[in-house]
């Protein structure tokens, strides 16, 4: 069935290296995507978003790439820091579902010293 | 206070108890949401309010009853819950439906 999913449930990265977190979606009608970061004991925090008319969007140390051909979304974190350790969720907005976001299961990022 | 706040942060209740979760947003948003977050499950949307009107109820059992008295406040009334209802309950708000959502810290609920 249709779903938003993450390829890797866990990811360990050396401090200072770049991290790449992936997300697959199945509905080609989705037109808005968000990456959230959830630290332990906190609610999800907005990181960056992208609309379907774009392929790439950059923020501070983060870049989101959207490949509509293969329905793939990725979050790149440059120079990963210990404070980046968290669970990362992608969320997909499907306009034919009444503009509600559907969240992926999440990927846990662990930054190694 | 800024952003989205939730109280209490932790709640333990028996199956026969009645309790309420409270959410308040200080962002001037028009839409508010309740989500359930269980271990090993994606975030599950429970209820959506837009301009204080409930616009969505995702087949949530009647033991969960939402209330939105105004655009800044959202409640989730709990009654005769089951142990499987133990989870983190997250409140969120957004400028309007379809816009990025801002989440509160959640209420960790344990049903004994």
Image: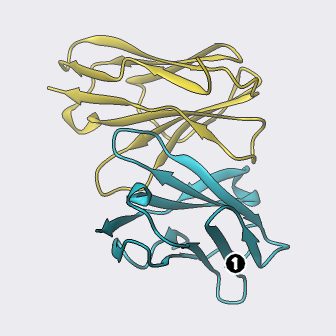
- Residue B86 position, x and y percent, is 26, 35
Query: In this view of the protein, which residue sits in the foreground, B27 or A29?
Result: B27
Query: In this view of the protein, which residue sits in the foreground, A109 or B19?
Result: A109
Q: In which quarter of the image is the C terminus of chain A?
A: bottom left
Query: Which colour represents chain B?
Result: yellow
Query: In this view of the protein, which residue sits in the foreground, A86 or A3?
Result: A86
Looking at the image, residue A53 sits to the left or right of residue A91; the answer is right
For image coordinates 85% across by 73% down, the residue present is A53
Quarter residue B108 falls in: top left
Query: In this view of the protein, which residue sits in the foreground, B59 or A10?
Result: A10
Q: How crowded is mark 1: few (under 14 residues within 10 Å), some or many (20 or more)?
A: many
Query: Which colour represents chain A?
Result: cyan
Q: Is residue A38 above or below residue B8?
A: below
Q: In this view, does A55 lie above or below A89?
A: below
Quarter residue A13 falls in: bottom left
Quarter residue A35 falls in: bottom right
Which residue is tagged 1?
Answer: A66
């Amino acid at each position: 069935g249709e779903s938003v999913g993450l390829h890797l449930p866990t990811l360990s990265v050396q401090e200072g290296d770049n991290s790449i977190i992936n997300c697959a979606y199945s509905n080609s009608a989705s037109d808005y995507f968000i990456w959230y970061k959830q630290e332990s004991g906190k609610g999800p925090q907005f990181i960056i978003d992208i609309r379907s008319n774009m392929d790439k969007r950059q923020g501070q140390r983060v870049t989101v790439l959207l490949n509509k051909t293969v329905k793939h979304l990725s979050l790149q974190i440059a120079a990963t820091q210990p404070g980046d350790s968290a669970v990362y969720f992608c969320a997909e907005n499907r306009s034919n579902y009444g503009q509600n976001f559907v969240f992926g299961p999440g990927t846990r990022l662990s930054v190694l010293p | 206070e800024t952003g989205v706040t939730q109280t209490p942060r932790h709640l333990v209740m028996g199956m026969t108890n009645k309790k309420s979760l409270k959410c308040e947003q200080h962002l001037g948003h028009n839409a508010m949401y309740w989500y359930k977050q269980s271990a090993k499950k994606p975030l599950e949307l429970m209820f959506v309010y837009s301009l204080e009107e409930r616009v969505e109820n995702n087949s949530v059992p009647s033991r969960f009853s939402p209330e939105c008295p105004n655009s800044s406040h959202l409640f989730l009334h709990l009654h005769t819950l089951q142990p499987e209802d133990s989870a983190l309950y997250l409140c969120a708000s957004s400028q309007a439906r379809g816009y990025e959502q801002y989440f509160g810290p959640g209420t960790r609920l344990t049903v004994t």
